[in-house]
Image (spheres, rainbow, N blue to C red):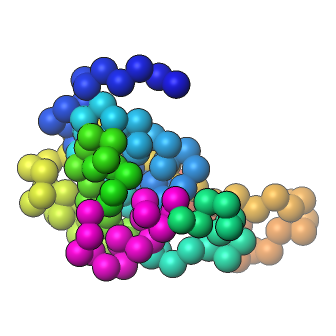
């Protein structure tokens, strides 16, 4: 585990795809170093295929429940030493991005670091991948806006 340096104290980090996986790990590490963390996730609802029972409670505490209620603190971020702002953001939607940025500016005074972690993948062969999935992956991974 990396040492907690506190070097991010006072900095605000906007992380897309921060509800699970690498984005969640980055958010928690940044919080341990004192950062304000904007947790940008596409939805407040769990993904049916990615919702593993062994991590359900952890994920609820980190994002889903608190994005939905917007009334409770995001315990894991704040317990780690940071401040959190959960936002529902589909990175393909410019209005949602602008809204989340405005919320971050209002709460933390600005954004210092962007971690563009949101992504989509479909593990099928090229010829077996439906066009709808290709469009989704290109829209999220290459930044096509709706």
Residue closer to the observer: 86 or 143: 86
* Image: 113 above or below 125: above
* Residue 59 in the image, given as x and y percentages of width and height: 51, 62
Q: In the image, 65: left or right of 98?
A: right
Q: For residue 111, say whether it is visible.
A: yes
Image point (52%, 25%), residue name? 1
Left of 81 or right of it: where is 129?
Answer: right
Quarter of the view holding residue 88: bottom left
Question: Would you identify the image quadrant in which residue 129 lies?
Answer: bottom right
Q: Residue at x 35, y 70 (%)?
A: 66
Residue placed most toward the observer, 77 or 20? 77
| Residue 142 at x, y percent in the picture | 54, 54
Magenta stretch in the rendered image: 58-73
| Residue drawn at x 51%, y 78% as measured from the top left | 45
Residue 10: x percent and y percent? 15, 36
The secondary structure that dominates the magenta segment is helix
Q: Nearer the viewer, residue 56 or 135?
A: 56
Question: Residue 4 sits in which quadrant?
Answer: top left
Left or right: where 44 falls relative to 98: right
Give the quadrant of the C terminus.
bottom left
Instruction: Tell me where residue 118 appears, x and y as whole percent.
Output: 51, 55
Query: Which residue lies at the image location 25% right of the left edge and 23% below the top edge?
Result: 7
Q: Is residue 143 visible?
A: no
Whether residue 142 appears in magenta in the rendering, the answer is: no
Q: Is residue 131 above or below residue 118?
A: below
Closest to the observer, 87 or 129: 87
């Amino acid at each position: 585990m990396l040492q907690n340096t506190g070097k991010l104290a006072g900095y605000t980090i906007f992380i897309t795809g921060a509800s699970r996986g690498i984005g969640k790990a980055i958010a928690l590490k940044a919080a341990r170093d004192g950062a304000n963390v904007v947790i940008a996730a596409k939805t407040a609802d769990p993904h049916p295929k990615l919702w593993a029972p062994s991590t359900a409670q952890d994920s609820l505490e980190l994002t889903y429940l608190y994005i939905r209620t917007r009334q409770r603190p995001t315990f894991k971020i704040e317990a780690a030493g940071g401040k959190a702002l959960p936002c529902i953001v589909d990175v393909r939607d410019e209005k949602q991005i602008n809204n989340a940025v405005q919320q971050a500016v209002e709460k933390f005074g600005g954004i210092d670091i962007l971690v563009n972690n949101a992504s989509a993948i479909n593990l099928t062969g090229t010829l077996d991948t439906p066009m709808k999935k290709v469009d989704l992956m290109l829209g999220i991974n290459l930044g096509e806006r709706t």
